[in-house]
Amino acid sequence: MLAKFLRLICKILFRVKVRGLENVPKENGSKENISKTNGLLIVANHESFLDGFLLGLYLPVTATFVVHTTVLKSWWFRQFLRLTPYLAVDPTSPLAMKKVIKLLEAGQNVVIFPEGRITLTGALMKVYDGPGFVAAKTGATILPVRVDGAAESYFGRLSNEHPRKILPKVTLTIQPVTHIDIPQNAHAPLSAKQRRRIAGEGMRSVMQHMLFQTQKSRTLFEAFLDAVDKFDGSYKLIEDLNEVEETYQALLKKSLALGRLATKISAPAEAVGVLMPNVTNTLALILGMSAFNRIPAMLNYTSGTAGMQNACIAANVKTVITSRKFIETAKLENEISHLDNLNIIYLEDLRAQFNVLDRAWLMGYALHYPRVAMEVSEPSKPAVVLFTSGSEGKPKGVVHSHQSILANVAQIMAIIDFNPTDKFMMALPIFHAFGFTGSLLPLFNGIKILLFPSPLQYKVIPEVIYDRGCTVLFSTSTFLGNYAKFAHPYDFYKLRLVIAGAEKLNDEVRKTYAEKFGIRILEGYGTTECAPVLSANTPMANLNGTVGQFVPGLEHKLESVPGIENGGLLHVRGENVMMGYYLFDAPGVLKPTDDGWYNTGDIVEVDAQGFIHIKGRVKRFAKIAGEMVSLEVVEKIANTAAPEYQHAASSQTDVQRGETIVLFTTDPALKREDLQMVAKNLKQPEIAIARKIVRIDELPLLGTGKTDYVTLKQMAEAA
């Protein structure tokens, strides 16, 4: 009766909702894959002092709670613990876990918080190895439970930057059961320490998958509205070079106004070109178009007239929204004037169409009831069209749904502890997948963001990072190397997370950031088709020389490639994978993926710990005298021989050998003998040494910061 009374009180105060009760195994163990001898191991994220209390009230099974010994010092907690069985342990003690193992082997259910402490960030914190070892040792069935909302109460331990509510809404989501299995190696048995570490990684993976799989299904604009509700409209969130921090309410107002204007020049579900820089209005336009079921097609203004024209043809874009001020500042008048069969709309002119009725609609209705004012769309419908760089021909339109973009945001948030105490520096262009998702992620999670118009301002950006107190930087290896040249050692004093993607991280850049700034760069891996993140090194799991482990919820398979012994061609499938392509030859016609699988075109090797080693792109292998040689290895040899210079490898046709490797370098003194000496030290074969060395002043780059290998291939054939 007391439990019923307490459940009623919690239902009234915290509006507690329990989902997934069907996933709780039956007591008789009749459910498939459920252990009939051992108890159930219930694991949950730890948001507040309420967590154990709520789990005890709402879980339909009797369980013993594992609590930290320090909890017993509180008189209040001792009174609550009288209502349920509990075991007080020190999670850092190996002996403590033996007591938990005995309970499970005796058939008792056990509840444990693998983090061992209440979160201070709102995200997943360090996961101890002990709970994973217990699960693996006993073979217990694991029941993950996501606690959501309790951290916002005054029973949580979040910082002042996080929103607090007296009576927040709390949701308990029970996930399907799982297990942790430690692979056995008959030739080299694992030590106890290795088994414990592998089990700990398995538990961390369970927790990350739990956080990802409990995401809500919604559109981009609905995700934005949820953030407005959670963090309050007066919360200062975003700024650009105008140096004015704008609130959620101001961004909402702009989004609704720009979305309303977009409806005047386009039809529902129409792809509309967006040719805009990194400014607040660009994100407001994207959100506004999402609110009114228009699909922004993000045009790459560095690709020239032909690149933009071909992209518009592929996505069947008829109208392009841009800014006259931007076109003049970026000196794009010539490119715009040569775009054919497109209706170019300038925001400055479009604002004049926002009449008295529109203002009345905005201020008297839409701003107060945005969920009613918006046009209904499905999360599975197209949300944005991003474009490939055209390195394999004409640009392809990559169609992402609301679901795929938000799935990738959830995947990233599940593995890295971004939180409202952070401030993003976003200099990567929003038309690039890394910049697009990287800009939306902070908006949906109450994290401040500074939009910077160009990543090429190598001297200015370090100063801006210092001046504005940024803590997170997304960039590419090339850009990071250039920032380091001009940055004062103290400019990056507040940066806590520097994440590199889009191209291989140069070892010299990694070393420079460690020695000059005391920063560990976390290397990730992504593709436009995957929204974009497939994997990343994280503060909890990092291995230099790799691109980290796969994000939760992503399946992968490797296809063998003739001539490649270790690794294979990577295919992936998951919620973050694109809907399909728009192609130049079939404008506006969606070419879907093959049963959800996407061929990345990359040769990778996945080690026993799940870390991904990229060998190179299939098209970046040269076939020399019948052998496959990675051009990535050729570049690694050159980078080791002359780390202070830039190098890139390509190939040219050779009648006798099939292909010949050409190395482009900015080093005026690099000789083949230098490469031979390094190759010998690195134990690389003679065939991986470039036959020809071409000296150039600087490597050609794409607007995203990647090396322009298409241009280099043309230069190689002409060399």
Image (tube, helix red, strand yellow):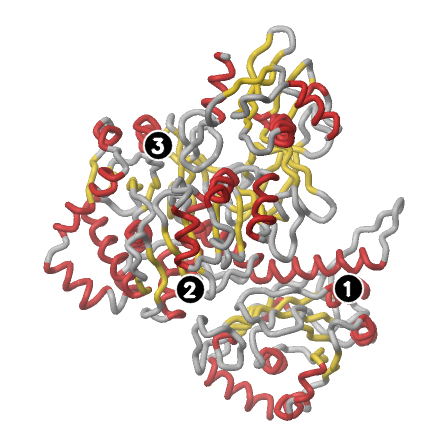
Q: Which residue is mark 2?
A: 446
* Residue 289 pos. (x, y %): 29, 51
Q: Residue at x 37, y 60 (%)?
A: 224
Element class at badge 2? loop
**Can I make out residue 136 in this image?**
yes
Q: Earlier in the sequence, mark 1 or mark 2?
A: 1
> 254 above or below 343?
below
Q: Earlier in the sequence, mark 3 or mark 1?
A: 1
Near-viewer residue (13 or 671): 671
Q: Disc 2 residue type?
A: Gly
Residue type indicated by callout 3: Ala
| Residue type marked 1 | Phe
Q: Is residue 714 above or below residue 487?
A: above
Taking 444 as reference, is 283 above or below it?
A: above
- Percent of width and height locating residue 572: 58, 41
Circle 1 is placed at which residue position?
133
Would residue 382 be visible to someone looking at this image?
no
Depth check: 321 or 654 in front? Answer: 654
